[in-house]
Amino acid sequence: MLDFSIRYLNVLKTQLSGLNLTNILDPDEFYQKQILDSILPYQESELFKKSVKETGVVVDVGFGGGFPILPLAKLLPEVKFVGVESRRKKAEAVTLIAKELGLNNVKLIHSRLEDFNFDRPATITFKAVGTIGDYLPIIHHKFPAKVFFYKGPSFLQLEGEQIKKVEKNWRLLENQEIKVPGTQQRFLVSFESVNVPRGTAKTLVKLSDFL
Ligand SMILES: C[S@@+](CC[C@H](N)C(=O)[O-])C[C@H]1O[C@@H](n2cnc3c(N)ncnc32)[C@H](O)[C@@H]1O
């Protein structure tokens, strides 16, 4: 993973230097705060591992500069990864990074969560993308879904009230502390859907088109 981290940072500093995809440019810091921070939740959470193994598909929403999707895709070459990012420039830049890093189990899509249809079983991840209360209710899914949010230390104080509002449709499974060396306390907060909503009239981008 260290070599992957060095090559990743090199692409950011050379071909994509004008884009400012991350402000962490020190190699050790980049390894800890971007690479380890992306993969440790998977390595430490049995629930996350089980969901990924069962579905074989991870959809990372709002991947920004490629986190956690690209480090996870490197770690798990047998799993299919689909990224959904609303900023076109980021989706294009991360497509280039994935190509440079030789990752062929990743598809990066310029779309929005609200326009995306999870029409196949998938494990869904969000890292530093808005609040649970805003994002869980706008997931269109046709199968029971498990969703994993990478969160900072004070999320319960910040989002506790909002979580109560989604309880009708989503069950909180776990709020697991993940220790990432040299970085702030990290929590992996997981939910599973309580029911499968009925279809929507909107035409949506389908996950199955990318598998
Ligand atoms: C703070 S960045 C986090 C990026 C990355 N996950 C990380 O941890 O470094 C949030 C990203 O989510 C994207 N985003 C926000 N709302 C979105 C939506 N509804 N659908 C898809 N992407 C979204 C933004 O464009 C932005 O790139």
Image (cartoon, rainbow, N blue to C red):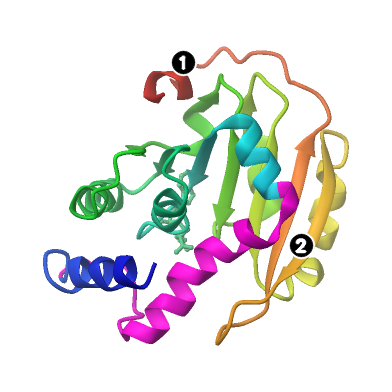
Marked residue nearer the N-terminal end (1 or 2): 2
Name the mark on residue 170: none
| Residue corresponding to mark 1 | 203
Left or right? Give the position of 194 relative to 81: right
Left or right? Give the position of 133 relative to 104: right
* Residue 183, horizontal then vertical, whole percent: 57, 83
Amino acid marked by disc 2? Glu
* Residue 12, horizontal then vertical, whole percent: 22, 68
| Main secondary structure found in the magenta portion | helix
Mark 1 residue element: loop
Q: Does the stretch in magenta take in 29?
A: yes
Residue in the foreground of this view, choosing between 3 and 179: 3
Q: Quadrant of the N terminus?
A: bottom left
Mark 2 residue element: helix
* Residue 135, horizontal then vertical, whole percent: 63, 45
* Residue 126, horizontal then vertical, whole percent: 57, 52
Against 3, residue 181 (above or below) is: below
Chain part drawn in magenta: 18-47
Report the number of numbered marks.
Answer: 2
**Whether residue 133 can be seen here:** no
Residue lying farthest left?
15
| Residue corresponding to mark 2 | 159
Against 47, residue 208 (above or below) is: above
